[in-house]
Amino acid sequence: MKSNSLFIRSLSGIVLVLVMVGMTLAWYDPATGVPGTTFYVLWTIVGLLTVWEYARLVKRHLADRTAGARVAWYVIGLLYIAQAIVLVMLLDPMMVVTLLTVVWLSDTGAYLIGSAIGRHKMAPTISPKKTWEGFAGGMLFAVGTALVWFSLYWSTQFDGAILTWGEAAYDDHVIGSLKWAGFGVVVGLAATLGDLIESKFKRTIRIKDSGGIIPGHGGMLDRFDALLLAVPVAWGYILLTGLLG
């Protein structure tokens, strides 16, 4: 039974990655940074499904709260989800894929290292399975992923501009590497905190999974919880550091 569950989780995870990356980059023009129509279709669907799932959970599990309390839950949660989706749609599609892979591999690293050597609980009352060892593994994976993206893709994206304005106007490779390592750090931290925020929400309403729309992974909030906070944090870091040139 466990092997069958792992197979379903792995298969649905692969399909999800292919759909997310494929629709984000379909008909994308790297020269102009203009997304294809599928980019907006995908992220609109993700946003609407996540909002629907959240509203359904609040309605079902917080029915005994006062009307004012329920309104507050609706407004705060819906704004939290909406801001991330809107900011995603304002990013270069390749940067969206970069951000997704940093978040996903941060989660993978935390799981692998935490499962192997995790001993010290990070937030036992909120997320009992999280450990400090897993957190460290997640951060290493996040930084490593960001540096790989910089080396293989982002460091070569401004060659034309350098020919026009001169290399002095742009970071050298060392500075660029440090900026991208920092990007991995802040995104890894935000992803972890975003995951903990959703875990706290689920404990508050006493559920295990936010839904069952993604086989083996739960609901939309379960799958995109880390991204909801990572997106605005990544935006702030990009603006503060001039990461994209």
Image: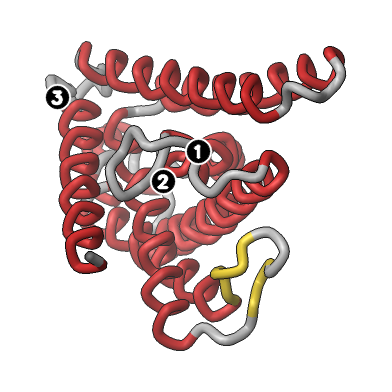
Near-viewer residue (116 or 136): 116
The residue that mark 2 highlights is 170
Q: CA distance from mark 3 to mark 2?
A: 30 Å
Q: Residue drawn at (44%, 35%), measured in percent from left and top?
A: 211
Query: Quick one: SS at disc 1?
Result: loop
Near-viewer residue (171 or 74): 74
Tally of numbered tags: 3
For badge 2, the amino acid type reads Tyr
Q: Residues within 10 Å of mark 1 (few under 14, many from 20)?
A: many
Q: Is residue 177 above or below residue 157?
A: below
Q: Earlier in the sequence, mark 1 or mark 3?
A: 3
The residue that mark 1 highlights is 210
Residue farthest left in this picture: 27
Q: CA distance from mark 1 to mark 3?
A: 29 Å
The residue that mark 3 highlights is 26
| Residue 207 x/y as whole percent | 58, 44
Q: CA distance from mark 2 to mark 1?
A: 45 Å
Q: Residue drawn at (24%, 38%), measured in percent from left and top?
A: 163
Is 99 on the left-hand or right-hand side of 216?
Answer: right
Q: Residues within 10 Å of mark 3 (few under 14, many from 20)?
A: some
Query: Quick one: SS at disc 3?
Result: loop
Q: Is residue 35 above or below residue 146?
A: above
Kindly indicate the quadrant of the structure image that contains residue 147: bottom left
Q: Residue drawn at (28%, 39%), measured in percent from left and top?
A: 158
Q: Is residue 211 above or below residue 3?
A: above
For badge 3, the amino acid type reads Ala
Which quarter of the figure is the C terminus placed in? top left
Please tell me whether mark 2 or mark 1 is closer to you in this view.
1
Q: Residue drawn at (42%, 34%), measured in percent from left and top?
A: 220
Which quarter of the figure is the N terminus placed in? bottom left
Marks 2/1 in contact by CB < 8 Å: the verdict is: no
The disc at residue 111 is none
